[in-house]
Amino acid sequence: MCGIVGYVGEREALPIILESLKRIEYRGYDSCGVFVLLEDGNPKLHKDAGTIDHLKKNLSESEYRGNVAIGHTRWATHGEPSKRNAHPHLDGKGEIAVVHNGIIENYQHIKEELLNQGYEFVSETDTEVIPHLINLSLKKFNWQLKEAVREALARLKGSYAIIVAEKGFEGLVAARNESPLIIGVGDRENFIASDVPAVLEQTNRVIYLEEGDLAVVKKDSIYIENGGVEVRREERLIPWTIEDAEKGGYEHFMLKEIHEEPRAIMDTLRGYLAEDRINLGFELEGNAKGKSILMVACGTSYYATLCGKQIIENLARVPVQVELASEFNYSDFVLDGTNIIAMAITQSGETADTLMALKKAKRYGSKTVAITNVLGSSATRIADETIYTGAGPEIGVAATKSFVAQLVIFYLLGLSLAKMPESEFRGYLEELRGMPKIAQIVLDEEDTNIQRHARYLSKYEHAFFVGRGVNLPIALEGALKLKEISYIHAEGYAAGELKHGPFALLTEDTPVVAILTRQPLGKFDQQPFKKSLIKNATQASQNIYEKTLGNVKEIKARGSPVIAIAEEGDEEVEKYVDAVIRVPETSTIFSPIPNTVALHLLAYWTAKERGCEIDKPRNLAKSVTVE
Ligand code: G6P
């Protein structure tokens, strides 16, 4: 949700700024801009509506030679996406430039005050008050930029990560409050950015700024203070490589990231599995004793969490309540927080609603856990404990590999809390360890088939996705993925619910994707470790399969085309549907993994067929740092 970057050093700043912006364009891409302090001491600004590539086309880089610069890529909050509203924003003299990610809630009030003092505004943004406020304070503080920024920030309410450049100042001032900001540490040069991928090509030494930090970054020094007092922040080594954050020969990040799903599963498992023991890095069992789990999340992470609820409840018989973070924040907390372990599930670790929910649970006395993909992200600093997904950097706006990595964490949580015979536990672990291979089989064997079905699906404007049980959240995820990148209106539904309304919409123009995987009868019999559960589990999954098949027949009777996701060897299904996507057999509880891979591919190829901007779907951003 807006990306900001800064550079100070001995190299040409502009190419570095443009490259860094490009790498975090997933944070917003409706407009962008750069501000460079030229070699002759004068500042130069260039901004425009549109993407970084568009900006570059009209930018004569040779006119922007200088060693200090800032840049911004925007996801509009206040004011339409336009050149006028694009960042950086300047003070009246054009000497102070600010890039900002976040929302200044009291900007209207400050703006009126500044207007009364004769300041002129050229944009509709909340951000523009910041350079004017800094300008106002500069005189008072004898032109000391750091002090002026500190005073200006004291006036602001809301969230911000900002970088400030000023004519004549051989460095940058940066500050954060509720929006992420990092410093990349170089050799006689330093970088500032919203996200790690922006600096990875230059350095993997990173300092995470904390709430309320203000930093003065020069080419050979980094000074950080909080509340006016100097503080030390640890430098961390980021394990990601630049190759992780590049397309590696794939046309889109999303396709690359879907192909990385087997690795994401493997790397996540590797972090917590040693021999036949799960070690999540903290004592979960003791903490969870007698408690229930509350999980909060947004978007794709929310659907993974809905699936996680079923996984954990099924394996461990521990009650799990799942809440959309944005709703939880404004609802009454009627539970006793001290009896709850609250978990925030967030790929980025920066989603504003999720962070708020985590803080709320903490206020109510809950033990808090962040499940995130990003080292050092805000969620990790709020929560008592952190469990990392090992998905590696995810750049495509539509989350894919992070979703399967989150599922893996839920299996590990469920198994850690489960009370089951050792042999049964080992059986589950064995099957879990086989999941990278299962995901790979879908990628290797079904991709071409899925492309064919995607060509077919791409001709429609509406679609339904149905599933039951542990695969209902996967149907929701399949629909979300399709709608966000292909712009086909898609809805995920519980298979049994379609007849309570959506049936009115079913025609030959509304295809339905049905998840029809099952636990084939007899499979449990071959696995003695599951004997205690054989009867119930087999019965339940068989029922789910049969009931869903029944729903599919009802759907077909209304004329809708049906694409089924079904297990290899299930010939029955072919009698009732128009097309089948095959996935390998697994136990029901693990079936979300291959089903997800198949649905992610289906969404990708459908969007590709429709010529959509896959990695940057319209109006979306990867990391939503505003409420
Ligand atoms: C945005 C992204 C989604 C993501 C959601 C939650 O909407 O476009 O892909 O699922 O935020 O993000 P988080 O980082 O908290 O998982």
Image (spheres, grey):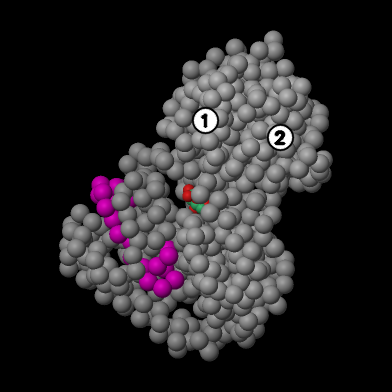
The residue located at (42%, 63%) in the rendering is: 474
Looking at the picture, does residue 285 appear above or below residue 236?
below
Image spot of residue 237 (x, y percent) = 75, 45
Image spot of residue 105 (x, y percent) = 54, 42
Residue 469 among magenta residues:
yes
- Span of residues in magenta: 454-474
Could you tell me which secondary element the residue under label 2 belongs to?
helix
Image spot of residue 430 (x, y percent) = 60, 73
Can you see residue 89?
A: no
**Residue at the spot of label 1:** 112
Q: Amino acid at mark 1?
A: Glu
Name the quadrant containing residue 588.
Answer: bottom left
| Circle 1 Cα neighbour tier, 10 Å, few/some/many (<14 / 14–19 / ≥20) | few
Could you tell me which secondary element the residue under label 1 belongs to?
helix
The residue located at (59%, 22%) in the rendering is: 91
Choose between 35 and 120: the one closer to the eye: 120
Query: Which numbered mark, 1 or 2, is in the foreground of this view?
Result: 1
Q: Amino acid at mark 2?
A: Arg
**Residue at the spot of label 2:** 150
In the orientation shown, which residue stands out farthest toward the top? 40
The residue located at (46%, 24%) in the rendering is: 83
Residue 9 among magenta residues:
no
Image spot of residue 214 (x, y percent) = 72, 38
Locate residue 134 relative to residue 86 in the image: left or right: right
